[in-house]
Image: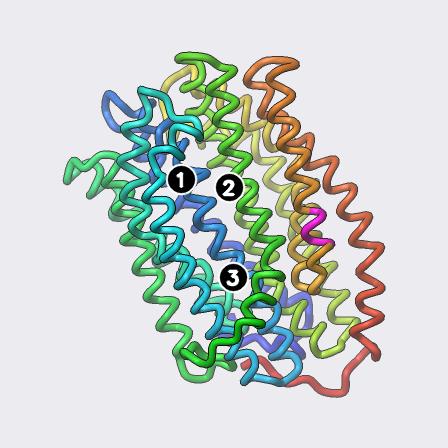
Amino acid sequence: MKKKNDLGRDPIPSLLLRLAVPTMLAQLINVLYSIVDRMFIGHIAGIGGLALAGTGVCGPIITLLSSFSFLVGLGGTPLMAMKLGAGDREAAAGILSNCFRLLLAMAAGLSLLFFLFRRQFLWWFGASEATFPYAMDYITVYIAGTAFALLSGGLNSFLIAQGRSGLGMGTVVLGAALNIALDPVFIFLLDMGVSGAAWATILSQAAACAFALVSLRLPGLPAPLRWGRFQPELCLRVLSLGLPPFLTYALDSVILIILNTALQRYGGPGEGDTLITCAAIVQSYTLLIGMPMSGITLGCQGAVSFNLGAGNRQRVKQALWGVFLLCTGFALLMLAATPFLSPQFVRFFSTDGETLIRSVRYIKIYTAGAFFMAVQWMCVDMSTALGQVRLALFCSLFRKSLFLGGILLFPVLFTASAAFAAEPFCDITASLVSITLFLRFTPKLLDRYCLRPEPAEVPAAR
């Protein structure tokens, strides 16, 4: 595989594969950050079920924290890629340096906020008397490593946007592999239980963060990391462009928190904890679909933004079609495999018969709209790559509102477990609206940016 991808000259199909496959695999491996802890925790003797429910309450909170890396990373990389496409490497490096400052500031502020209010958050977001101690042990340690999570996630996208998808994959693989190795040591060998899983995670994220920082200082990068000059207006532009993908991830986390709360409330004592345990497993499986699709769109954003900045209409259109086919193809593959994969997947978390039967059923319901999820994901992230902030924001918020409505309404009309049906309901409905708007507004954008079908020459991204 080529180490350096020429975003302006390489054939689009092979370029997208070289960009998408490593980041897709990296995001798939990144899922292990979220689910390996739960797998080991679910098998702690005597307390596995309750401990898994406790970390299930923490899961959306952790995802909410991590989503701030997308606010900066996915807000800054399209701007940087456009500058590289226009041949302005100095401006591209300035964007990276300001995004680095933003990530540092966010890490400090969020760590303090979540540490001070962690008890209240856990009670508000679905913890019970039985699960609270395990949730508290896990979240207290995890918050201490917030800076590593934000920096590794946020900076990694700037490697990918410069055509270094291999280094981007290396950042994630390093962290995930270390997490897998450390989990059994801290949880079982050192007998640290739930808090041991959190320690394994933050140490792994620290290693990934160090790798990303070193990689961005390597010679030969078009836009290397340096301190640079602080530009407040540029930071506001980054935050504005990053708002739609941030809301996509952050509001998903908020809605999952509401889902846990609804399951606890309408399920009642005992049943509520069982449903949250199942929800933790269901959400872990959903990451096997959502995170690789995120890798596809993240990996290909640079190619779309670069060629838009270079004014190459044909390559932008080819890239958009390529992303659509990759996302929907992967979603259909996972949809077909779910009936066979889901029982084996659940056994990684629990050997309890009732948990197995119910979790498999809920997984099939939750992922029924996977094809439409892919369409929605492509529309939001590619709108961001094209700089269409308002369109991306509307599509994201529209889907969230449908999801939230389903979570709040379905348990009232039917049973507590009916809340799981809110996911396919919102995926199908929102994707039809999003693709209609995307097809309407994107040609007008290309008419404005791409005044000629083929530019004479574009600078290579080396």
Please rate how many residues cluster around mark 2, counting C-alpha atoms within 10 Å: few if below 14, some from 14 to 19, many from 20. some
Q: CA distance from mark 2 to mark 1?
A: 9 Å
Which residue position holds label 2? 287
Residue in the foreground of this view, choosing between 314 and 377: 377
Q: Amino acid at mark 2?
A: Leu
Q: CA distance from mark 3 to mark 1?
A: 25 Å
Quarter location, residue 40 = top left
Which residue position holds label 1? 35
Q: Secondary structure at mark 2?
A: helix
The part of the chain drawn in magenta is 391-395
Q: Position of residue 332 (x, y in %)?
A: 66, 41
Q: CA distance from mark 3 to mark 2?
A: 21 Å
Disc 3 or disc 1, which is closer to the eye? 3
Please report contact status of discs 2 and 1: CB closer than 8 Å, yes or no. Answer: yes
Residue in the foreground of this view, choosing between 425 and 5: 425
In the displayed structure image, the side of residue 301 where residue 46 appears, left or right: left
Residue shown at 77% from the left, 65% from the top: 317
Residue shown at 68% from the left, 40% from the top: 399
Q: Position of residue 419 (x, y in %)?
A: 59, 23
Q: Amino acid at mark 1?
A: Ile
Residue in the foreground of this view, choosing between 65 and 121: 121
Which residue position holds label 3? 72
